[in-house]
């Protein structure tokens, strides 16, 4: 099939590469406009745009997918299908109606669970044991379209959202190609999503990533892992922000009040609403990432100090 691939971040790259290696013909790529990055804040292409350029594929970067110039070009290209992975913008009905087989989204959850922009983060934060990925037909509702295929993936006890998303991106790339193959062969029929089990996964905000030390240790662990690498879990120490990398549950039996810091030979403990956690790496405001023990030595923590 002639396809227009839509995607933007790193997580979409495995799917684009898999389709490029398949028998389908990627005739154009739709992606978000260049964005400022790095210390110089220069406008740079995103990962999907870079792969498309390397492959010599036409790259379309409208401000919005409803822009008239983009819709005109899409009609000129006349793709058979438009696979989508983390494009980052709404696809209007005028664009949805152009490909004969519609727009097929690779979504990183087992729909109808975790509809929205951050399904992997919410699955970890909620303590789910199993998640997965689905391919479904995009319609005007948010992740409500009928499903073509799905796969499951266990959530490991130490998974960050980055770890889990990387595995789902690789496995999902194969699922997306298989879905395109099945649609072209006429052997796949999309099935409506169940009415039960719907949950929403809105994009996590910076405030969502702030650790509540009064919460149980298991909750603290999940929040930090869910927010790693983005938007990045954080707390405050001496009224300055301190970013947190994954923590470990403390098996020692120590008891500490929520947020209270205890520096020992075996690590830096912080109290929670249940039992303490051991900090891993941290990043003080304006400084590099470092082991928590190095940070604690550098700031010379006073007895009774706490994270807020």
Image: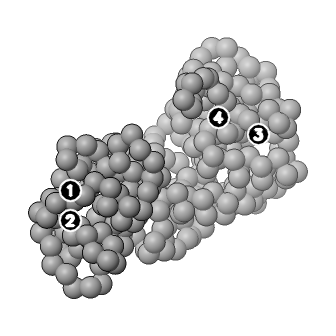
Res 179 visible: no
Q: Secondary structure at mark 3?
A: helix
Please tell me the numbered disc located at residue 307: 1
Q: In the depicted view, which residue is nearer to us: 228 or 59?
A: 228
- Closer to the chain start, of discs 3 and 1, is 3
Quadrant (top left, top right, bottom left, bottom right) of the N terminus: top right
In this rendering, the label closer to the viewer, 2 or 4? 2
Q: Secondary structure at mark 1?
A: loop
Disc 2 to disc 1: CB gap under 8 Å: yes
Q: Secondary structure at mark 2?
A: strand
Distance (Cα) linking label 4 and label 3:
9 Å
Which corner quadrant of the image does residue 158 belong to? bottom left
- Closer to the chain start, of discs 2 and 4, is 4
The percent coordinates of residue 156 (x first, y second) are: 48, 74
For disc 4, the marked residue is: 46
Which corner quadrant of the image does residue 53 belong to? top right
Q: Is residue 170 above or below residue 24?
A: below
- Closer to the chain start, of discs 4 and 3, is 4
Q: Secondary structure at mark 4?
A: loop
In this rendering, the label closer to the viewer, 3 or 1? 1
- Closer to the chain start, of discs 4 and 1, is 4
Q: Going 60% across and 29% down the picture, which residue do you hit? A: 32
Please tell me the numbered disc located at residue 75: none
The colour scheme applied to this rendered structure is one colour
Disc tally is 4
Disc 4 to disc 1: CB gap under 8 Å: no
Q: Is residue 103 above or below residue 289?
A: above
Distance (Cα) linking label 4 and label 1:
36 Å
Distance (Cα) linking label 2 and label 1:
7 Å
Distance (Cα) linking label 2 and label 3:
46 Å
Q: Is residue 36 left or right of residue 58?
A: left
For disc 2, the marked residue is: 261
């Amino acid at each position: 099939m002639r396809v227009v691939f839509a995607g933007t971040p790193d997580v979409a790259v495995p799917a684009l590469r898999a389709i490029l290696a398949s028998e389908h013909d990627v005739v154009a790529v739709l992606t978000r406009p260049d964005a400022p990055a790095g210390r110089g804040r220069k406008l740079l292409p995103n990962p999907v745009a870079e792969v498309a350029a390397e492959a010599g594929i036409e790259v379309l970067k409208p401000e919005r997918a409803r822009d008239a110039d983009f819709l005109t070009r899409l009609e000129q290209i006349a793709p058979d299908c438009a696979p989508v992975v983390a494009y980052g913008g709404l696809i209007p009905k005028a664009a949805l109606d152009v490909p004969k087989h519609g727009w097929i989204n690779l979504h990183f959850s087992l729909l109808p669970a975790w509809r929205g922009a951050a399904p992997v983060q919410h699955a970890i934060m909620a303590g789910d044991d199993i998640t997965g990925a689905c391919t479904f037909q995009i319609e005007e509702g948010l992740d409500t379209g009928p499903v073509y295929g799905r796969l499951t993936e266990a959530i490991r006890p130490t998974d960050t959202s980055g770890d889990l998303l990387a595995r789902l991106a690789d496995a999902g790339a194969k699922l997306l190609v298989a879905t395109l193959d099945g649609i072209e062969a006429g052997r796949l029929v999309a099935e409506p999503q169940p009415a039960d089990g719907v949950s929403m996964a809105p994009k996590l905000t910076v405030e969502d990533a702030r650790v509540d030390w009064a919460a149980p240790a298991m909750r603290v662990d999940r929040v930090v892992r869910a927010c790693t690498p983005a938007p990045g879990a954080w707390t405050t120490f001496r009224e300055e922000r301190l970013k947190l990398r994954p923590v470990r549950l403390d098996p020692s039996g120590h008891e500490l009040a929520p947020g209270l810091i205890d520096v020992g030979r075996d690590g830096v403990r912080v109290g929670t609403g249940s039992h303490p956690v051991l900090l891993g790496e941290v990043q003080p405001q304006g400084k590099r990432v470092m082991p928590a023990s190095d940070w604690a030595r550098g700031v010379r923590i006073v007895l009774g100090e706490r994270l807020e």
